[in-house]
Amino acid sequence: MVEKMQRVAFKMKLLPGHKEEYIRRHDAIWPQLVNLLKEAGISEYSIYLDEETSTLFAFQKVSGKGGSQDLAIHDVVQQWWAHMADIMEVNPDQSPVSQPLEEVFFME
C-alpha cells in the first residue's frame, strides 16, 4: 500500500534582528538532522520569513502520518532545538513555539 503524501504547514516566531543568524545556522544544518528528517518521510521542507512580523512559515511534504514536529524523542532534534533556542520563541522544553496552519487552497 502506498502512503499518501500530505502537505504540512506551520508557523513559528523568530526573535527580531536574528534573520542572518537563522539563515547561517540553517545553511549549516547538521547532516544527521537532515538524514533523520528524510528517514521520517519529510521532503521539500521550506521555511519562509515575514520580516514585518518575524513570523516563520514552514512547509513540508510528508509521506506517512507525522512530520518534523513529531520527532522530539530524538537526541539530534533536542540538540537542534537547544541550538536555535536563543533566536526563536520556544517552549519550556526548548522546542519552537509552533502553530499548525490549515490548508485552505491547493492547486496542482
Image: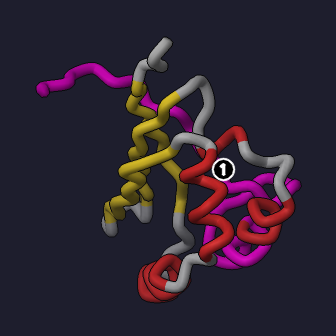
- 56 is higher (above) or lower (below) than 2: below
Residue most extreme to the top: 1
Residue type, numbered disc 1: Val
Q: In the rendered structure, which segment of residues is drawn in magenta?
A: 81-108
Which corner quadrant of the image does residue 35 belong to?
bottom right
Work out whether 6 lies above or below 29.
above
Q: Residue at x 55, y 52 (%)?
A: 38
Viewport quadrant of the C terminus: top left
- Which residue is found at the position 81% from the left and 62% from the top? 78
The secondary structure making up most of the magenta span is loop
Residue 94: image location, x then y, percent: 80, 61
Numbered label tally: 1
The percent coordinates of residue 60 (x first, y second) are 42, 44
Q: Report if residue 107 lies within the magenta region.
A: yes
Which residue does the numbered mark 1 point to in the structure image?
Answer: 97
In the displayed structure, does residue 44 sit left or right of residue 104? right
